[in-house]
Image: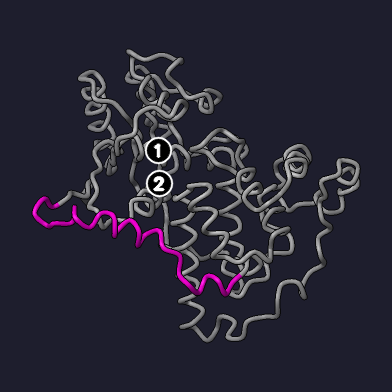
Amino acid sequence: MKTEIVVDEDSGVGDNVQSSCSVHREIPSYFGEYCLADLPSEIQEYLIMQLDVPKLGIYFKNWEWLADSLGMKPEAIKYLRDRIQHPQSPTGELLKRHRDVKLDVFMRIIRDDLQRLDIFSHVKRLFINLKSKQENSPNINAEFPSSYSNRVEETPNITSSVSDMQNADSAYGHASSSTTQGVNSSKFGDVSSMHPDGVHLVDCILIVTYGQSNYLSKHLSWLCKNLAAYGSEVIRSDKLSFDATVDLDGFLLKQFNQALAIMIICTPEFRRIVEEDAYNDQSAQVVKFLFRLISAEYRSMGCKNYRFRPVLFQKYSMNDVPSILKNTIIHRWPEQHEELMDLTFSSRK
């Protein structure tokens, strides 16, 4: 299986980059026929996983940015931040409170205000697939149910008054730990077991890295040969190149979801990309996108690490490890070769 998508220099696709990108970011007109109340549980859970993260800056725009774009006042946002803690979900509460917001409006906020194209691409594809299944299968609710407002109790408003917010426990004190309360009734029925791409873990190791030094290149090549010796396909983020017609966000998301393990090669350049927004070439954009996914999954699991393997080569130090990863196991390589391989491939057993 190839690990690269190679641009055909003679295909002329370079002239169509702008139009191709605009197609990937279009919002289907029929999205305006749906509200957030119609989102199936799988999309709700995905949004919760992606947005229930601390406010870390422009590349980690979270539920607080969403709340602001939806018109929530700062005092109400602070209330949610202070009172709704893991395993409860502030994103879930936003979806419930703004359940009458049209889906096209919501998607425009995700795309333009939050600039979370990873979320936009995934939700768009999943919703389109679900609508197609609903239209083509007689077993999936042929008749749409009545409006959401007729199915659940109204949620009391959170006001701008601090004194009023102190009495708002009934509205925001009992959020569900995994899905949004009261928003699970959907025009698509129960689709919790569905996935847009039928994604399952495969024996593939995704390596997230950035840098061009001879030292880094030599050690990466050495590490990849060792991983390949275990029979795994190895995909390196720095070796991917993309045809203009490829849905970059969707491709990276699929590779991320399928990977058995994700190795993060910690270097000074890598840390500056994810913490200081350094560099802006395509490889850096790929790293930023993948690290957003890493951070979201790590936090959604209560900071328990299942798939991520931060690696330090001999030349680099703990100062080169992003802060969010410092509380997990850091592997020195090649000194800790056996430990790294055992942990990486333990899920095979």
On whether residue 30 falls in the magenta region, the answer is yes
Q: Position of residue 248 (x, y in %)?
A: 33, 51
Residue at the spot 27% in from the left edge and 44% down from the top edge: 233
Magenta span: 8-34
Say which quarter of the image contains residue 238.
top left
Left or right side of 234 for 36: right
On whether residue 320 falls in the magenta region, the answer is no
Residue at the spot 86% in from the left edge and 40% down from the top edge: 162
Q: CA distance from mark 2 to mark 1?
A: 8 Å
Residue at the spot 39% in from the left edge and 24% down from the top edge: 266
Main SS, magenta region, reads helix
Say which quarter of the image contains residue 179.
bottom right
**Would you name the residue on which mark 2 appears?**
256
Check whether the beta carbons of the residues at disc 2 and disc 1 lie within 8 A of each other. yes
Vertical position of residue 236 compared to residue 249: above or below: above
Within-10-Å neighbours for mark 2: few <14, some 14–19, many 20+: some
Q: Position of residue 282 (x, y in %)?
A: 30, 39
Helix, strand or loop for disc 1:
strand
Q: Quadrant of the C terminus?
A: top left
